[in-house]
Amino acid sequence: NAGVTQTPKFQVLKTGQSMTLQCAQDMNHNSMYWYRQDPGMGLRLIYYSASEGTTDKGEVPNGYNVSRLNKREFSLRLESAAPSQTSVYFCAVAGGVGSYEQYFGPGTRLTVT
Amino acid sequence: GENVEQHPSTLSVQEGDSAVIKCTYSDSASNYFPWYKQELGKGPQLIIDIRSNVGEKKDQRIAVTLNKTAKHFSLHITETQPEDSAVYFCAATYSGYALNFGKGTSLLVTP
């Protein structure tokens, strides 16, 4: 039982390159979230998916797209990476209606040069 | 999302002492307040939470108190140990089930 897994763990991109961060869960939870964490900024919500087939913007969605592939998987895509997107990205899951508890994955550390 | 202010940003205590971290929120509709512990290189781990219909919750050495009128909530850690050293984040719900996080408190417990 791995809980929430994220791939890759580390990635270095050049400005303008694209990539997809993957998140998968085996907790059978309905809601999934993508956050970014920058020094001194806490965690900021990029996008979330309350249930399979739905996605919504969070606080900082610009420059990102998401896909809720199925109940288990939620991916985050950077179409044209910028240095401002250098950050640690976390995926989280929650049970859904009536269940607020969010459980986080181990993170992906992304550097854009 | 609505602001969540967290203080202090750094806290140093001696082993065995108590540590208190405070947060304030602005959205009166917030009804769930979790606390997370994050160790270096790891994802945040949920350590305790409280809902708006409860004033206090305790789990062994950690407790959380909530004052809905004043819109603030606090994390209390008693009998601190070196392994409590980490960054702690508070959060509050907004727009349904999304969370707005504070900027974190770096706690150092010295032997």
Image (cartoon, coloured by chain):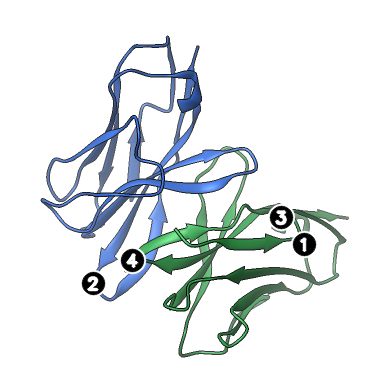
Chain colours: A blue, B green
Amino acid at circle 3: Glu
| Residue located beneath label 1 in the image | B81
The disc label shown at residue A97, or none: 2
The residue depicted at 48 percent of the width and 72 percent of the height is B27
Subunit of mark 2? A
- Frontmost residue, A42 versus A5: A42
In three-dimensional space, the C-alpha distance between marks 2 and 3, rounded to whole angstroms, equals: 34 Å
Chain letter for the residue marked with disc 3 in the picture:
B
Q: Are marks 2 and 4 on the same chain?
A: no
| Residue type highlighted by circle 1 | Gln
Determine which residue is flagged by label 3: B83
Callout 4 amino acid: Tyr
B55 or B108: nearer the eye? B55
Task: Give the CA separation, mark 2 to mark 4.
Answer: 8 Å
Instruction: Give the number of the mark in front: 2 or 1.
Output: 2
* Residue on which disc 4 sits: B97
Q: Are marks 3 and 1 in contact (CB under 8 Å)?
A: yes
The answer to which of marks 3 and 4 sits earlier in the sequence is 3
Q: Around disc 1, counting alpha carbons within 10 Å, would you say few (fewer than 14), some (14 to 19), or many (20 or more)? A: some
